[in-house]
Amino acid sequence: MSRLEARPDRFVAIAVLMLAPTGALLAALVLSGRLDPLLAIAAFAVVGAVTAVARHLVLRDSRLIAAYLDQVRDRRTPLPPPQARTLTGAALLEDIAHLHQGWLRHREEIEHRLAADEAVVEALHDPLMLVDAKRRVGRANSAARALFGDRMLTRDLAVSVRNPDVLSVVDAVLAGGDSRRVEFTLPLPVERVLEVRVTPFRQPAEDGGEDGEITAIVTLHDITAIKRSEQMRADFVANASHELRTPLSTLVGFIETLRGPARDDADARDRFLAIMQEQAGRMSRLVMDLLSLSRIELDEHTHPTGETNVAALVQSVVAMLELKAAARKITIKVQGGEGLPRVQGDEDQLTQVFQNLIDNAIKYGREQTEVVVTLERADAPPMPGATGIRARQVPHGPRIQGIKVSVTDKGDGIARTHLPRLTERFYRVDAARSRALGGTGLGLAIVKHIVNRHRGRLTIDSEVGKGSTFTVHLPAADKAEKAVPQSAPNLSQEGGRGAA
């Protein structure tokens, strides 16, 4: 029902007001004898008929216009019906319809552009936030919400970004300053360096003027890879120059000796060449480990996407090291491994982790002992910062399902004073013994960085005279804990056989 039909018919009152004077005039003429009563009645009927026709025409146009306006109110885009073109306001009504259709098309274009802009902002890899004059986060794209959580919206920026340098830069821009940049570090879960760019944006005023509220567009760009590349080059030069100095000096000395006093000494030549080959092999291993460590550190802030069956992976590593263990009359025994969940990780890097740990256990374990590799579910990860010391379990925090792999040897053990520094580059408890066994001092550093990349923890427990246990804690691939099929190899058997 149109608005006109919902109201009382005002044209009835208008018709009465129009006919009342005419009837009074005709009655006066009849009473004065100047007009015949029949003619007066005929005249009054003619006037009434003309009024009724006028009322009908006006009401017809009015009802059509009212119905059209109701359709516009309901966001429909009608055109006047064909019969309306013969009415009084038809041309104007048709023009209004065309204008309305054009306005709707323009509005749809604007909505599509806004939707496209919103999709672009949401798809940005870098976090982006819009902060109002009171430093509250009005909008944040998906990358920002993933980094700081959905609760950051409508709250002060300080709730999410607790860095005084960043907050001071945002305040300066909101106070009317120009665009600024600042760097800050996120320590958890893996240390990342972010560059914050704050750009002022003046929103239009409610009256359409230019003196609106100043807001700030805050974007965060991850420059961890750039910073680590710079540090990697500096560390590589420093480490290579320090660690390669000794073998290079040895090679140069032996070469000079072979070209001089030992030129014709066959026994000395064979002995010196053997030492030179050993030193050259040490330099090759050192360079390879340095390059491997640099690549791992470069990708440490990116979480791997693949899924790995750790139980099968450990089994393959044990098979590779059986002969090396047998040469020292060491038995590798693997316990557990049935029904463990998969972990989200890089299979090649995890292989490197367990190969380094089991290889170290073989190197530093006493002969005619055994190396025990234990695989089991982990109720909870160790407390943050437990790398290099004995881990304590989280007493009340939320438990994260995962697995842990422990490698235990029967060696001489490590004093507790050395444990916090074991994962540092080139740190050795016994440097001479480590070099004699072919170690480069980078194995545990590589393990630590790979485990960090997988959002896990490395814990070390050792007792002098009894041996050491290195444990890798890894979170499960997902909360559903997709377990390894029961048809997987049974890892509770011995992985190697030592000589009698």
Image (cartoon, grey):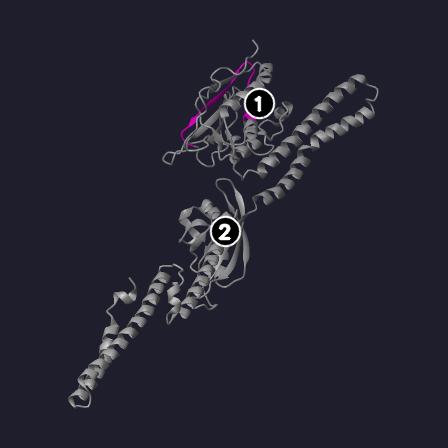
Query: Mark 2 or mark 1: which is in front?
Result: 2
Q: Is residue 303 magenta?
A: no
| Residue type of the residue flagged with mark 2 | Val
Decide which of 353, 61 is in the foreground and name it.
61
**Residue drawn at point x = 84 percent, y = 19 percent:** 264
> What is the crowding at mark 1: few (fewer than 14 residues within 10 Å), some, or many (at least 20)?
some
> What is the crowding at mark 2: few (fewer than 14 residues within 10 Å), some, or many (at least 20)?
some
**What distance separates the C-alpha of mark 2 from that of mark 1?**
49 Å
Relative to residue 60, is residue 35 depicted above or below? below
Decide which of 98, 376 is in the foreground and name it.
98
| Residue type of the residue flagged with mark 1 | Asp
**Which quadrant would residue 289 be assigned to in this image?**
top right
**Label tally:** 2
Q: Earlier in the sequence, mark 2 or mark 1?
A: 2
Report the magenta residues as a range: 354-380
**Which quadrant would residue 270 be assigned to in this image?**
top right
Residue reaching furthest to the top: 500
> In the image, which disc is placed on residue 467?
none
Query: From this viewpoint, is residue 164 visible?
Result: no
Relative to residue 234, is residue 41 depicted above or below? below
Task: Label 2: state its secondary structure.
Answer: helix
User: Residue 442 placed where, x, y %?
Assistant: 60, 31
**Residue at label 2?**
121
> In the image, which disc is placed on residue 359?
1
Decide which of 409, 421 is in the foreground and name it.
409
**Residue drawn at point x = 17 percent, y = 87 percent:** 30
Q: Is residue 376 magenta?
A: yes
- Asked if disc 2 and disc 1 are in contact, CB closer than 8 Å, the reply is no
